[in-house]
């Protein structure tokens, strides 16, 4: 049916490439392009022999001209950005220059300030509309499936949704005292930032990890979780009718938090460059270099993830609550595609989002968050491609 250019060859890209190959009727041809070409070639090696034709390329995604030249050469129908959030705008610029659809899983973040918000990408709305191409923002799990779940709940279960709590539980154990499940730089920047949530149309800010709750997760059990700022809060508060409050919670073990506190206290999580032996280094980037590579956690990680949304609102004048969630098993993911569940739960929706554009099921020129599209075909594909969802009409709610 079409051609996809996948940028990045890390944990998430690896899963996405596997899934594109499983969906070869839609993904006839893919090109994996990244800064380190050997990683693209290794993926190609692992997966060639199937129906999807695979090629690879070297590209610096910070450079619009390089990206544009690659897109002109490969002529994809969609570009799937699975590099880092810093590359979102350059890749969007190259898509505009060549008239190609765009998909990503994380919103733009300037490298020098740990602050992520949609304003930079939303500013491209008119340009994409005029070019007649679609940018699908946030097609991972959270953001991503959480937005699809919200659109599905709005479409089928509620007249208005007043409260959403997004709960992200990772009960996986990799056996290391401290490691991050995805890119350490992005992960640590996210969890060491101030928390925030939206209430009555306004952001309420908290200190990092200030708000703690305990939740009994289906198929996992009780876990401590903490309120974090998360990017989909911003778009869901705009796109879902009747929202009064929307919050995001993520589980962390005590050991993870103690290590993080210590690293913060000694300055290792700082993004301010320091002078070291005549060279400027960013402490957080150095920390990334000494921590285990998230890709290496796959074979060691046991246990499950549970990510989902609890909705509270009204249907036919009556109060209603509804919980949609997915449970994913780290070892099962590793057996299937050679990656743990955090990469898996992001790479699968990235493939599905791109397939929605390639098949024309979603076609809305402009820059759109995922909850702005019809959730039904996406929900079907989740069941088909390894992320089946569960629902409950009587969930525990979060205080
Ligand atoms: P990794 O660090 O494993 O992979 C990133 C890849 O991007 C690497 O292959 C890296 O190349 C490549 N890259 C980085 N900079 C450039 C550049 N300038 N030009 C070309 N390639 C580049 O990250 P993950 O796979 O864990 O994460 C990928 C994305 O997914 C991130 O944006 C992350 O925020 C997002 N994410 C989203 C989630 C969601 O649920 N929505 C959850 C988890 C992650 P090299 O090998 O040379 O370093």
Image (spheres, rainbow, N blue to C red):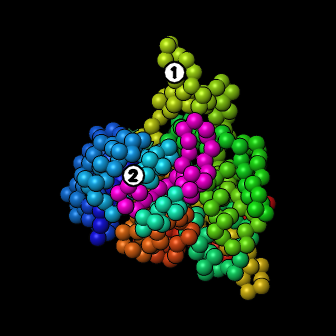
Of residue 309 and residue 105, the one placed in the foreground of this image is: 105
Left or right relative to 395: residue 291: left
Q: Quadrant of residue 217?
A: bottom right
At 30% from the left and 42% from the top, the residue drawn is 58
- Is label 2 in a helix, a strand or a loop? helix
Of the numbered discs in the image, which one, if any, rests on residue 280?
1
The residue identified by callout 2 is 94
Left or right relative to 10: residue 126: right
Q: Where ligand 1 lies, by image quadrant?
A: top left
Of the numbered discs in the image, which one, if any, rests on residue 24?
none
The residue mark sitting in front, 2 or 1, is 2
Residue 150 picture location, percent across and down: 61, 69
Residue 375 picture location, percent across and down: 52, 74
Tell me where the magenta segment starts and ends, as one range.
94-123
Residue 329 visible at all: no
At 57% from the left and 21% from the top, the residue drawn is 274
User: What distance separates the C-alpha of mark 2 from that of mark 1?
Assistant: 31 Å
In the image, farthest residue toward the top: 277
Of residue 277 and residue 111, the one placed in the foreground of this image is: 111
- The answer to whether residue 263 is magenta is no
* Label 1 CA crowd tier, 10 Å (few <14, some 14–19, many 20+): few
Quadrant of the drawing holding the N terminus: bottom left
In the image, farthest residue toward the left: 49
At 76% from the left and 42% from the top, the residue drawn is 207
């Amino acid at each position: 049916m079409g051609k996809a250019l996948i940028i990045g060859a890390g944990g998430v890209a690896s899963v996405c490439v596997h899934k594109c190959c499983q969906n070869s009727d839609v993904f006839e041809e893919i090109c994996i392009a990244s800064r380190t070409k050997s990683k693209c070639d290794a993926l190609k090696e692992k997966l060639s022999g199937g129906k999807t034709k695979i090629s690879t390329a070297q590209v610096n995604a910070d450079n619009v001209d390089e990206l544009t030249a690659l897109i002109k050469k490969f002529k994809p129908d969609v570009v799937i950005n699975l590099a880092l959030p810093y590359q979102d705008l350059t890749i969007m610029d190259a898509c505009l220059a060549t008239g190609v659809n765009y998909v990503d899983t994380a919103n733009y973040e300037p490298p020098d300030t740990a602050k992520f918000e949609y304003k930079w990408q939303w500013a491209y709305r008119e340009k994409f509309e005029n070019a007649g191409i679609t940018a699908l923002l946030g097609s991972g799990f959270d953001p991503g499936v959480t937005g699809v779940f919200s659109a599905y709940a709005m479409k089928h279960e509620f007249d208005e949704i007043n409260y959403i709590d997004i709960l992200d539980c990772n009960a996986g154990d990799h056996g290391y005292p401290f490691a991050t499940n995805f890119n350490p730089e992005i992960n640590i920047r996210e969890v060491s930032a101030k928390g925030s949530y939206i209430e009555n149309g306004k952001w309420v800010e908290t200190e990092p990890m200030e708000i703690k709750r305990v939740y009994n997760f289906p198929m996992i059990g009780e876990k401590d979780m903490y309120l974090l700022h998360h990017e989909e809060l911003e778009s869901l508060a705009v796109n879902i009718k009747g929202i009064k409050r929307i919050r995001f919670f993520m589980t962390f073990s005590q050991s993870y938090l103690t290590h993080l506190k210590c690293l913060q206290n000694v300055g290792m999580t700082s993004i301010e460059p320091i002078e070291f032996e005549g060279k400027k280094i960013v402490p957080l980037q150095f920390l990334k270099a000494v921590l285990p590579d998230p890709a290496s956690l796959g074979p060691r990680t046991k246990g499950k993830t549970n990510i989902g949304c609890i909705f509270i609102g009204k249907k036919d004048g009556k109060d209603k609550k509804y919980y949609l969630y997915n449970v994913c098993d780290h070892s099962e993911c590793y057996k299937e595609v050679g990656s743990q569940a955090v990469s898996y739960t992001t790479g699968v929706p990235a493939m599905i989002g791109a397939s929605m554009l390639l098949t024309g099921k979603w076609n809305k020129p402009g820059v759109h968050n995922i909850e702005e599209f019809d959730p039904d075909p996406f929900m079907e594909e989740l069941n088909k491609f390894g992320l089946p969802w569960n629902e409950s009409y009587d969930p525990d709610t979060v205080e």
